[in-house]
Amino acid sequence: MYIKSQAYILFLRSLICMNSALGRIPGNIPSDVKKIRIENSHLAELPQGAFSSNPALEYLWLNFNNITVMHTRCMQGLGRLSELRLQGNKLRSIPWTTFQDCPALTILDLKRNQLDALPESALRYLTNLTYLDLSFNRLTVVSGNVFLNWTVYQRTQQNDGPRDAVANALLALHDNPWFCDCRLKGFVHFLKSISPPIILMNSYLTCSGPDSRAGVFFYKVELKSCFKPSVTSENMNVSVPFGEKVHLSCRAQGNPTPTVWWTNGVKIIRKINVKHTSVDEETVNSELVVPSAQGTDGGVYICSAANYLGNVSVQILVKTLTSVTLPMPSYLPPSSPGEESVYIDVSIAKQMVYGIVLKWHAVTLDPAETWYTLHFGKFDDPYTEKISIAPGVNTYSINELFPATKYKVCVSLRNQSPTRGRCIVFVTGTDISEMEQRERLIHIIVIACAMLLAVPAGMYACTTDTRFSCCFDKCAKACRRQRRGDKALRKAAQNVTFDSLQMGSDAELCNRASKEDKRRRKKSDDKTHKAKAELKTSDELY
């Protein structure tokens, strides 16, 4: 019989389909077909009863498809099937009970899939198997009972006659990421003890982990038995003065190596405060550090350890000897209802070509657990970017600032609106044609405007309530007059740094020393004194 269609070819009671777009098992396959070969196609699933209309089927090759799912009864009606090849698919698990419908199965090829587990009962229904290929999968740990309970293996152990009377059984288990800890002890022992008629296609199996055994051959590995973890601590009661560093430690033992973590109440302590040290394969030392003991740091700390056999914990009581109220500056504004009493001092720690580094100092009741929110945006823009800052961090870099732009940045407790005294307003310089001059001008203008609170009142022309165009015009004109008068002074002004600026010195900003400038500054002083009341309500300038 010879039938050819667009999807497959039927020839001599065989169906062959190679390199096609076939996405499912055809439903019109003749019932007397003995061999089906569908490879390099797009099969993704083997549904229930996929071949129930083909009871004569003996060979089923479905290599190099995209099969990810096998239904538990996908082999229903295949009592004569002797060979099943599923190489190069994407199977993560196999419904092993499906093979009870295939009592005649002798060859099972599952090479190059994604299998990561092999249950103890996996081979129960494969009673006549002579070839099993599980190589190039993702198996890490397998119980030795999987093969010790296998009917084929038991048959070889019980046979008292000549070995030739029992058919050989080939196993391929190489190229899996075996994790050689105590859980693999039974499996390694089985592999070391097997002999014909059970044959390994590649007897040089190697460990992929842990690191101490990576690359070691199975026949060189000696594994210990597994046991439940235990935890101990030398000091169960710790007293520490207020503000001092606290060191808590515990030792966990178990096989496999236990996972260790710390809790305080129902809260899991962050890993940045915990250090784990491996003593050997079965022992882990863990240390918890509290940088500065506060009143809220007292209480019960729990060191817990767990592996697959169970978990255990030990409690350590911590007492803070003295309760101290944190000093709060007298000039802080009153806190709004529901807001934590906190002091935050914000400053510009460093200036870069296109940005700044913001720094803040905060006094809170619980520094180790206090999160902040940084509010940043253009001064007149109602939209501000909100950035969450983790505990223990007190700096943040703001980059890619635009020239000739007024910005406002504030720091507050997380999810709270910024309040007076926690903000900085600053202005970037103008843009000019030459890149090198542009970079230096932005740098100097940002410093000059940031330092305006330190100079006499007459210089408040660049403060929060002044229009930026006016602010920059006055600053820029004065600097241009000075550059025309003295090139040497201009060079010195370009190289000025944050630390070299003199507080309250006009000369260090623009070096305006002429008599006419002094008369103008005197008039400006009179006008500024009148506007002082309004400026006090503005955000604090750096």
Image: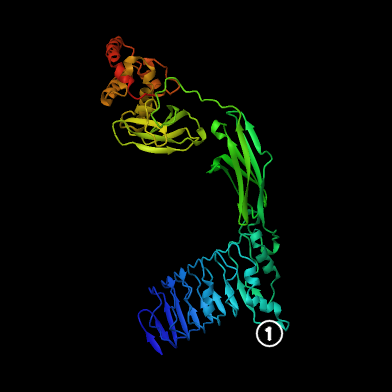
Of residues 79 and 377, the one drawn nearer to the viewer in this rendering = 79
Image quadrant for the N terminus? bottom left
Instruction: Identify whether 469 is placed above or below 128.
Output: above
Residue 287, image x and y in percent? Answer: 62, 41
Q: In the shown orientation, is residue 224 left or right of residue 39? A: right
Q: Which residue is the extreme one toward the bottom?
A: 1
Residue 210 appearing in the image: no
- Quarter of the image holding residue 347? top left
Q: In the shown orientation, is residue 189 left or right of residue 538? A: right
The residue sitting at 61% across, 35% down in the picture is 318
Of residues 534 and 440, the one drawn nearer to the viewer in this rendering = 534
Image quadrant for the C terminus? top left
Instruction: Identify whether 416 is placed above or below 98.
Output: above
* Residue, disc 1: 165
The residue sitting at 38% across, 83% down in the picture is 28
Instruction: Identify whether 528 is placed above or below 186.
Output: above
Residue 151 appearing in the image: yes
Residue 126, image x and y in percent? Answer: 58, 77
Q: Amino acid at mark 1?
A: Ala
Q: In what element is the residue under mark 1?
A: helix
